[in-house]
Image (cartoon, helix red, strand yellow):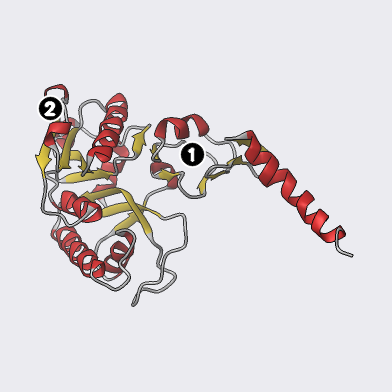
């Protein structure tokens, strides 16, 4: 456990530009308060009126309007963090475990982030063996090397936006700048950024701590809130798999059409040929 003096310089940062993301931010903040009621929070937004300021304890709302788009807004919010140790959270996160352990990582490292669950896009000058990271949950400390990294990331993303085929998100530029930086990086385990938008693996012995989903209530009902006895694979829109068997499906028709009828259709095509 971190002592109170250490917590005084720790905080959570959100970036919420637009009504949809303001709503998501309030929902994520509510989940954070259930497990960590006293940690400081700073929200960067283009709509201060969207937040009930009198009802948000240990929370500061700052207006930010000079970002080019949502991803640029996110980078600017991270650069503007007032904390010595920061935890940035996308608005579509649900905090299920106390994030105190994440701040403790910064005793030895500059930045912590989880690897992305899909294959990285090619980036010039970056080897294929260097992974892409999911920037929905980022832990970082105030240091010259991190300040320089965030500034270079912002510039790289801005430059890429002007290309003939602009990037769909901020992660390729994050990967490009991180590869050439001197930041001391530690990868976060998947349970600290469990993103169910893509197929995801929860390792045996792990308990989901931060759920990353645009439908957090529904996703939280899907995932088991207990330590996994064996590794599990979550398939978006389909269900949950264990190495031994299929255990849960979100929709019964998904099981029949995807899990049973496809082999039958294949056999029909094979034996139906004359």
The vertical placement of 166 against 213, above or below, is below
Residue 273 horizontal side relative to residue 99, left or right:
right
Residue 229 horizontal side relative to residue 107, left or right:
right
Say which quarter of the image contains residue 16.
top left
Taking the spot 41% from the left edge, 63% from the top edge, the residue there is 131
Element on which disc 1 rests: loop
Say which quarter of the image contains residue 63.
top left
User: Considering only order in the chain, which callout, 1 or 2, is on the residue closer to the N terminus?
Assistant: 2
Q: Residue 210's spot in the image, x, y percent?
A: 38, 38
- What residue sits right under mark 2 in the picture? 53
- What residue sits right under mark 1 in the picture? 206
The vertical placement of 201 against 152, above or below, is above
Identity of the residue furthest to the bottom in this view: 125
* Visible residue check, residue 156: yes
Q: Distance from label 2 to label 1 (Cα)?
A: 36 Å
On the rendered image, what quadrant is the C terminus found in? bottom right
Element on which disc 2 rests: helix
Q: How many marks?
A: 2
Q: Nearer the viewer, residue 85 or 121?
A: 121
Identity of the residue furthest to the right in this view: 274
Q: Residue 154's spot in the image, x, y percent?
A: 19, 62
Q: Residue 37's spot in the image, x, y percent?
A: 24, 25
Taking the spot 41% from the left edge, 67% from the top edge, the residue there is 121
């Amino acid at each position: 456990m971190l002592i109170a003096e250490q917590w005084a310089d720790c905080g959570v940062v959100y970036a919420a530009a637009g009504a949809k993301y303001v709503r998501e931010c309030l929902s994520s903040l509510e989940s954070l308060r259930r497990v960590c009621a006293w940690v400081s929070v700073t929200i960067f937004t283009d709509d201060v009126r969207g937040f009930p300021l009198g009802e948000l304890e240990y929370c500061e709302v700052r207006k930010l309007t000079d970002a080019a788009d949502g991803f640029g807004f996110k980078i600017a919010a991270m650069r503007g963090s007032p904390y010595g140790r920061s935890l940035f959270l996308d608005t579509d996160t649900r905090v299920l475990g106390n994030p105190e352990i994440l701040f403790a990582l910064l005793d030895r490292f500059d930045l912590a982030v989880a690897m992305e669950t899909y294959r990285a896009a090619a980036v010039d000058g970056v080897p294929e063996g260097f992974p892409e990271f999911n920037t929905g949950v980022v832990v970082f400390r105030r240091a010259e090397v991190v300040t320089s990294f965030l500034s270079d990331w912002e510039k790289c993303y801005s430059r890429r936006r002007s290309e003939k085929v602009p990037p769909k998100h901020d992660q390729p530029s994050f990967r490009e700048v991180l590869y050439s930086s001197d930041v001391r990086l530690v990868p976060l385990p998947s349970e600290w950024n469990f993103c169910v938008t893509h197929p995801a693996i929860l390792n045996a012995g792990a308990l989901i701590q931060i759920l990353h989903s645009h439908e957090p209530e529904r996703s939280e009902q899907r995932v088991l809130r207990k330590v996994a006895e064996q590794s599990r694979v979550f398939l978006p829109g389909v269900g949950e798999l264990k190495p031994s068997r299929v255990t849960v499906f979100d929709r019964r028709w998904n099981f029949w059409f995807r899990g049973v009828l496809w082999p039958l259709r294949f056999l029909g095509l094979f034996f139906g040929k004359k």
